[in-house]
Image (cartoon, grey):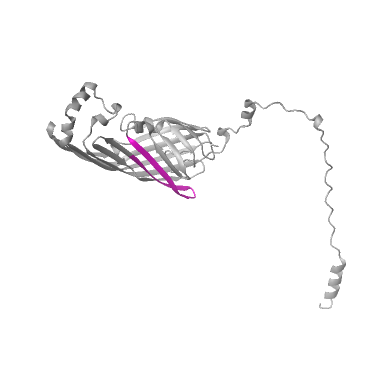
Amino acid sequence: MWMLLPLVCVAMAQDPAPETDPPPPPPPPVDLDPEQAAKLEDITTEGLEYFEPKRHLLPQEPFAQTDFTAYTLEWGEVKVGLASVSVGLLPRFQVSTVPVLDALRVYNGTVKFDALRAGPFDFALGSGFYVLPIGGFTASYMSPGLTVSMRPTASWSVHVGGSYLRVRGSGFPDLDKVPRPLYGLTQAQLDEWEEFSAELRADSAINIAGDGSTLRIATDYRFNRRDSIVLNFSSILSGKATGDASIPLLGVGESFQQDTSFLQSWNATLSYQVTWKQVDLRLGGGYSAYPLVWLVQANDVSYRFGGETRR
């Protein structure tokens, strides 16, 4: 066998490798005559709209909704709604306020930070703040909490959130400092109040304290980038409020305590959500333990602008 090895090497050396065909020559350049080019008609607005992508034909966007989810507005994006104004102040961080309440001296704000995104899960931290100063009386409200958004499928999301409620108030109100829409007194009644309000404030005090916890569960199914269905449920799991009022001039010296249960505060709604390029519209109905509370949760309209995607 060793004697055959040189013969095999010689045969392999004499067998040339097959030649490949040379690449085809490039096509000759096309001689274009600008004089023979036809001018296109002017493009109209209707013509541009024909080529604009239609949102109901585009893939759905799971991060479009920010009011009941862990998601936030884009950096630089602004959302102006019926009740509130929200701004994407930083990446994954937004702040909101209710201008109507600010005008009535109920100073308020809400912050939310989408702190962690792990696959289909988002974890957001947030809190709401409300302060009502009425002369010598100041009431405050705070609600720190956590919201988790998860996407079981590409078109379906579930959102679960909870928060702790803390309400405090102390002092004695001065109706002269209260905006007129917040009370129902006539001018004559207000004048009578002003006559002895200074004497009342000298020896009187009101103290209130409230603590509780809330639960919110929402789910949305998105048919496309424009149309979706939202099911929303919220309630105070438990709450307790205590207080005392001491008004010697009126012979008032009372304490009170009130508990709020799950059955007294639940709110369930079903809505149809339409998300256009800059306008969001949510219409629906529902039922709540307190009459008509479901209206705010089931219905909303807002206008968005700014942000990288909007631009």
Question: Which residue is outermost to the bottom?
Answer: 2
Q: Is residue 53 left or right of residue 117?
A: right
Residue 286 is at least partly visible in this image = no
Answer with the quarter of the image where residue 141 lies.
top left
Q: Out of 166 and 271, give the one closest to the viewer.
A: 166
Q: Is residue 23 left or right of residue 259?
A: right
Residue 10 is at least partly visible in this image = yes
How far from the left and from the top, in percent, is residue 156?
Answer: 48, 41
Q: Out of 125 and 22, give the one closest to the viewer.
A: 125
How far from the left and from the top, in percent, is residue 225?
Answer: 53, 36
Q: Find out whether residue 101 is within the magenta segment.
A: no
How far from the left and from the top, in percent, is residue 303?
Answer: 48, 32
Location of the C terminus by quadrant is top right
Residue stretch rendered in magenta on the structure: 106-129
Q: Find out whether residue 126 is within the magenta segment.
A: yes
Please count the marks in the image: 0
Q: Could you tell me what secondary structure mostly forms the magenta stretch? A: strand
Q: Is residue 276 left or right of residue 33?
A: left
Location of the N terminus by quadrant is bottom right
| Residue occupying the point 29% across, 26% down | 180
Answer with the quarter of the image where residue 66 lies.
top left
Q: Is residue 132 left or right of residue 75?
A: left
Q: Out of 152 and 111, give the one closest to the viewer.
A: 111
| Residue occupying the point 41% across, 38% down | 96
How far from the left and from the top, in percent, is residue 45?
Answer: 62, 26
